[in-house]
Amino acid sequence: MQKKVAVFTGTRAEYGLLYWLLHDINADSELQLQLLVTGSHLSPEFGNTYQQIIADGFDIADKIEILLSSDSSVGTVKSMGLALIGLADSLSRLQPDVLILLGDRFEALAAAQAAMLMKIPVLHLHGGEITEGATDDAIRHAITKLSYWHATSTEVYRQRVIQLGESPERVKNVGAIGLDHLKRTRLLSRDQLADALDFKLNQPYFVVTYHPVTLAEEPPLASFNALLNALDQFKQYQIILTYPNADEGGRQIIERLLSYAAEQPDRVLAVTSLGQLRYLSAVKHAAAIIGNSSSGIIEVPAFNVPTVNIGARQQGRLAAPSVQHCRIDTSDIAASIKRVLSNAIPVGDNPYGQGNVSANVIQMIKQLHFNPVKKFYDLPGAKL
């Protein structure tokens, strides 16, 4: 009998990281993929990216509408409530043997809560990581405690998940799953990328993504303007500017992003969603990646492309030497860009590995045995 594997995705970035795992589950005769799609995938404002999932050949088992037309913490909480209601129906109907969640989004927290209460084991990817400037940090650790199996991206993060009370035999260090694209995805040439974007790439360029910071004191619009002011000091570079995610404050950034691109149509391209192929191809040929996305820390160093990581959102994450951290300040951002362009930053090793992660996760799925009574693991020598 096939094992039913539900996989949850709420954003374009998360889906891109999961692509090869979804492909391998789909291709395995012992497994049945049940893909749950929600969040910004179903929003026209964020590109209706569920259409890309279908174009990639995946069947969607259920679409769960949760995204409200709101840009506030109240709207986020209400979206989580809608997610819980929708997931209760979906999981009850599908009866999966395991639910796979990646990362730290509020949508994923709702899925973890629903699965735990319905006694469906959760396999969590990318637990144990630290992002001190975002509410994602607390959400990630909460998902860890609601999950049964854990596939971490580094050994340091594996140890942290164990520190959170998860038994070592249920915590595996497999590396960062998005890096499977390095070995398995045929990326576009620079000319092919320009054609795919319908944008002339006739200068060196930056890929820029700035998300709202949900915990640290970084006002979205003022912070984004500081970044744009720094970019204006590099007029010889074109810019591929991608939308932020659907967090509180994101719509302010989108409005400013669109006006900035309209002011310089030959230099700046605003893109709702690049998709994984165009995004990774853009990274491969870029002079630098700039912003505060986790991709700049986890995936980009594997391409030997430098990253300027701005502000507090990713504070605490392990990073390769090619990642240059800076404050959300125009002069500091500009100085950091100059530093990475001068080749003064060493490349070094990527702590997140070099791919081949999907096969390890598939093996975990097949070996999974679930006991809903999960004991808290105390570290040896802990005084209780």
Image: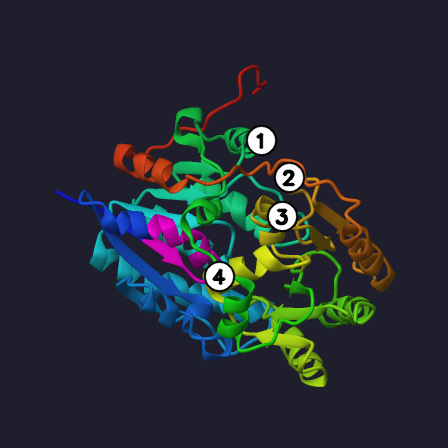
Alpha carbon separation for disc pair 3 and 1: 15 Å
Please tell me whether mark 3 sits on a helix, a strand or a loop.
Answer: helix
Q: Are marks 3 and 1 in contact (CB under 8 Å)?
A: no
Q: Residue 92 lies in what quarter of the image?
A: bottom left
Magenta stretch: helix, strand or loop mostly:
helix
Q: Disc 3 designates what residue?
A: 297
Q: Are marks 3 and 2 in contact (CB under 8 Å)?
A: yes
The residue sitting at 67% across, 83% down in the picture is: 265
The residue sitting at 49% across, 30% down in the picture is: 165
Label for residue 53? none
Q: Is residue 4 above or below residue 291?
A: above
Region in magenta: 7-22
Q: Disc 4 designates what residue?
A: 188
Q: Disc 1 designates what residue?
A: 156
Q: Is residue 173 above or below residue 79?
A: above
Applied colour scheme: rainbow
> Which amino acid type is shown beneath numbered disc 4?
Leu
> Which amino acid type is shown beneath numbered disc 3?
Ile
Q: Are marks 2 and 1 in contact (CB under 8 Å)?
A: yes
> Which amino acid type is shown beneath numbered disc 1?
Val
Q: Disc 2 designates what residue?
A: 318
Alpha carbon separation for disc pair 3 and 2: 8 Å
